[in-house]
Amino acid sequence: MRGRLQSSLQRLGFSLIAVMLCVILAQPAQALTANVPTRLPAPSTETAPVTDETAYTGVLLVVVNPHTGLFAADNPVDNVDPSGNEYEAVGMLGVIDIGRMFFAAISPATGKAKSSAATAVLLPNLPTDKKTQLLVGLIFAESSSKNWGGGDNEDEKIEMGLTVLNRTYYATQNAPNGRNYNKTFGSGTVLSALQYHGEFVAYGGDRWKQVMNGDSLKSKAELDKLQLFEKEHLSLSIDAAAFCTDGKAPLPTGLAGIGDPAGQFPIAFNKAANSPPNSARMVKFLHVGSHTFYSFIAGRETQ
């Protein structure tokens, strides 16, 4: 008797679940909350990084943004939640990746969603302007990735791009006495900033050459030959470079809300804990990813 009762209850439970799924799938588009980037521009129709929380409107179980990764928890590169939040598996049945049919499997051991496999990484549209291409090469070559530096970090990538752009601004600014103390920043172009000897060591190096032919981005056909994690890293580098060059903020500029104090304008970075290239003029304000970033000491921007 007890066995028949348990069996009946189990069948009833499964029936209720089936009915609920049918009702949900029959509903029109519902507003859901998911993790999508807040710093980078609108996601492309092919891929986009998943790094932060904001409101998103979509249909249950169907994600319009075709990005490999579970929005509710995992970083698509190294399965780490970049927000530092833990998410329960309740209600996270999976993500259908349009075009790639990526399925996120639930791990009963940890209660977190883990990606089972990624069959492909679709690169976003490649930038055509030289300035953005150069920033892509620099960010790809210098910033952290899954197998180099501890994992991809969106803020680190953007701060690197802004460092180069801020140098193009300060390179043309003279002190009150008419002298220019920022000659190591180049002549005011992205290329001259990257080419100045000893300032950006990855420029022209092996990692640079993975995605660049000289000072131009390789073709999509060539870039599609990269390994999976390298394509993820490149995709995030492209998005970060596009954010930096979108023209929405005049130079010099920085990211609001991060750093100590927050919102500083980066003009240099390295891997030291706190060793500014010029301690008389620069001060540490942020460590993110595997790099420390420096800004000018107030009043020392041109002197």
Image (spheres, rainbow, N blue to C red):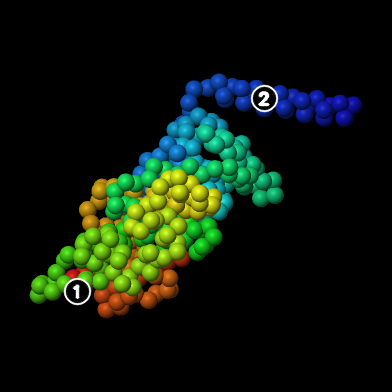
Q: Is residue 154 visible?
A: no
* Quarter of the picture holding the N terminus: top right
Q: Which mark is residue 181?
A: 1
Callout 2, which amino acid? Ala
Q: Where's residue 296, x and y in %?
A: 26, 69
> Looking at the rendering, which quadrant does residue 163 occupy?
bottom left
Q: Nearer the viewer, residue 239 or 201?
A: 201
Answer whether labels 1 and 2 touch (C-beta < 8 Å): no
Q: Nearer the viewer, residue 3 or 277?
A: 277
Callout 1, which amino acid? Tyr
Q: Residue at x 9, y 75 (%)?
A: 177
Q: Where's residue 132, x and y in %?
A: 32, 52
Q: Where's residue 279, x and y in %?
A: 30, 78
Q: Residues within 10 Å of mark 1 (few under 14, many from 20)?
A: some
Q: Is residue 119 above or below residue 192?
A: above
Q: Is residue 216 visible?
A: yes
For disc 2, the marked residue is 18
Residue occupying the far left of the picture: 177
> Looking at the rendering, which quadrant does residue 178 occupy?
bottom left
Q: Nearer the viewer, residue 192 or 5?
A: 192
Q: Nearer the viewer, residue 200 or 240?
A: 200
